[in-house]
Every structure is written in C-alpha cells, then in structure tokens.
Image (spheres, rainbow, N blue to C red):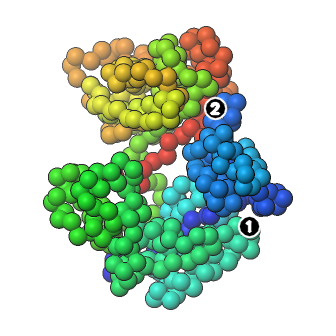
Amino acid sequence: MSILRRFILHSDLNNFYASVECRLNPRLAKNAVIVVGDVEKRHGVVLAKNYIAKSCGVKTGDTVIEAENKCRDIAILSKVPARLWLYQRVSKIVKSIYLKYTDNVESFGIDEAWLDVSANAKSYAEAMELAEMIRQEVKETLGLTVSIGVSYNKIFAKLGSDLKKPDAITMITRGNFRERVWPLPANALLYVGHATEKRLTKMNIKTIGDLATTDVKTLQRVFGIMGTRLWEFANGLDNSPVQRWGDKDETKSIGNSVTCPKDLTNMDDVNTVIYTLAECVAMRLKREAMYCKEIQITIKNNRLESYERQCKLPYPTDTSKDIAESAIKLFVASNGLAEPVRALGIRLKDFSTDMQLSLLSDHTSITKQETLDKTIDKIRDKYGCYAIGRGNTLLDAELGDINPQAELHIIHPQYYRF
C-alpha cells in the first residue's frame, strides 16, 4: 500500500464513561453527570463527565468537591462510581464493529482507535462514507456517539476527531491541512502536553503553523528527537502504520500507579507503597520475559502537583527488590517527603531479553530473589493479590489494602517513542 494513498480514521467515543452510564440510566441524561473513582479510597476525582457537567466548567481530574461547587447553582449533579469492567465490555463491542470494516484497528486507550480503511476506500468520498457507516452503526447498536477524523495519517485523523464533537465527522487532507490545522493552538497536536506547550510558548511558537515553519534544527536543539517528531507531525509527515488488530505491539514501558488511601508523611509508608507497586510491575515484566534497564517514579503531592524522576539501573533486572530499592533511592534523592504524598507511580523502561550481569554482581543473591518473586507470583496468580504479602503491608490496614493490579492503576504503553 503506497504511503501516498492512505485513508486513516480515528474514532473517539464521546464522553465514553458518562455516556455509557446515561445510556443505561436515561434519567441521568438531564443532569450534570460525573463518573468518579472510589471516594473512600481517595480515587474520588472526575474520570469523565457529560456535556452538561462540562458546560458547568467541570474538568477531568477535578475533585468531587470542585465539581460540586462548579455545578451548585447551575445544574443537578449526579455522581456515578466508575465501572471499568463495564466500559471495557462496551469497548470490545465497539471494536468488533470497527473490525467489520478493516482488520487494521489500533486501540488508543479504551475509547479511541485508529482504522486504516485504505483497502476499502479509493477516495476521500468513500472514506467519508465508511466513517458515516461506522458512526451510524455504533449509534444504532449501542446508543453511543462517536466523533471521527478522516485523514491520510494517524496524527491528523486524531486531530480531526477532536475538532468537532459530539457525533461528527471531520476530514483533513493533504490539500487543506494548512488551512484547517495550522491556525490551531500548538497544544491541539498530539503529544504537545502542558510542559512542552510552555517551552514552545517561550520560543514564541503558539500555533501548529508556527511549529511547522520553525527550523527543525532549532527544535532538535531544544527537544531532541521529540522536536523532530513534532515538526513532522505539524507538517503532516507522520507515516506510522495502523497496527493490525491482534498483533502484539512492542512493549515500551510497564507501569503502575496508585492514589494512596491516606497522605504519606513518613518513609515507612512510602516504602510500603513502593514495594507493593514494585512487586506488581516486576510480575508484569516477567510475563513479558524481559529485564528493565531504566526506572521512573512519579510523585503527586497533596496539592495535586506531579513530578517525575528517573535513572538508569546498574544492570538489567526483573526482581521486585531491585526495582523497589532503586525507586526508594530516587524518591529520597528527589526530597519526595518535602510535602505529603498523595499518589505514587513506578514505570519501567529500556528493556532487554537478558540480564548481562557484571562480574561484580551478586549472582547468588539475584537468583534467590528471582526464585522468590516467581513463587510469590504463582501464589497470587492462583489465589489472588492478597494471598501473600510483605510484613510491612500488615502494619497499616489502609496501605495494605492497595491492589495495584486493578485496571484503574495500570499505566498503559505509550504509542510513539521519542
């Protein structure tokens, strides 16, 4: 398939969690609806909202109290606990609809996907017809709406689905992208987050057009390879393929995070949470039959401010002990307890398929730890997460109740590697 003639769709389920809840309980539809995590376990932030709540100023990530204050004088607020198992089931049904139109379906989270329909569309008109058929089938089958972007690459297809919501189709072509895309703010482009936007603003780069017309070498000096990728994205030069459904993507990171049931104010509590997370990511790493060479921790304080720290490991490892000890060193070096800690996360990166131990490594100790980890993993696979645990998890009932294997806490892979 020639890169010059591609027709890519990006389908985004509108307000997915909230839409599913409103569909199942139509009485909610007239209210401002927010889907929230477990308030008692302090996951009580807004995970999704409907358009009425959005019109009140509610944002994803707001606390429940913030959402209540924003809706107080405007609309009745309905708070619905998240049911991830339900949303996953609905997501699978939606993906099965997509697969009627192409085998090239690549998920981008639970509610979004790219579809390459080049084999079934010979023109933009035909690609638009397929998009309309998908939109109608999702609505008729599930009562949910999607916004679909139609373009010649994944980046502009994704941007197109964001341009008009809900229940809409937007087309971006080689002939019109400068007119449609370049006037948009730089943060409308995929992977231009808050930190990147601030750095671009300091360079007087405010729109996607500004980014596209900036000398790529200047962007490389500031952002490294990421600068090159963003310049390519802004100029419509993304040629990445849409993954075939069922193909296993290369694992680029493995991570878990948790909002703690109470603020962490001492290292004993921090150690408990870090070891819990480390055991979980180590289990997932072993399932991939890989070793990690880099670790990253994310710390969120009680003012909901987050920051990350990362380091290379002295040798590739898959043991929970090595991962936990490295994470604790990073935490201490970052002065992590300068403020009470609300949430912690661990992400493993830079993988290899062998250990490559140095002559200075304690081979016997490492082998014993690997054997211990595997035994613990087998017990948990058979009897559940709480069947066996470290002694320090028994000292605090709240922290000992953390289950980082829950879907809510899994940090999913990044889809582009810079």
Task: Out of 214 and 132, give the one closest to the viewer.
Answer: 214
Task: Out of 228 and 78, give the one closest to the viewer.
Answer: 78
Alpha-carbon distance for marks 2 and 1?
32 Å
Q: Is residue 19 visible?
A: yes
Please, what secondary structure does the residue beneath circle 2 have?
loop
Front disc: 2 or 1: 2
How many residues crowd mark 2 within 10 Å: few (<14), some (14–19), many (20+)?
some
How many residues crowd mark 1 within 10 Å: few (<14), some (14–19), many (20+)?
few
- Among numbered discs 2 and 1, the one appearing first in the sequence: 2
**Is residue 290 placed above or below 208 in the rendered structure?**
above
Percent position (x, y) of residue 240? 36, 66
Quadrant position of the N terminus in the picture: bottom left
Q: Is residue 2 visible?
A: no
| Identity of the residue furthest to the right in this view | 27
Percent position (x, y) of residue 244? 48, 65
Please, what secondary structure does the residue beneath circle 1 have?
helix
Residue sitting at 28 percent across and 51 percent down? 199
Percent position (x, y) of residue 40? 70, 30
Percent position (x, y) of residue 392? 56, 12
Q: Left or right: 179 with respect to 360?
A: right
Question: Which residue carries the number 2 mark?
Answer: 42
Question: Which residue carries the number 1 mark?
Answer: 142
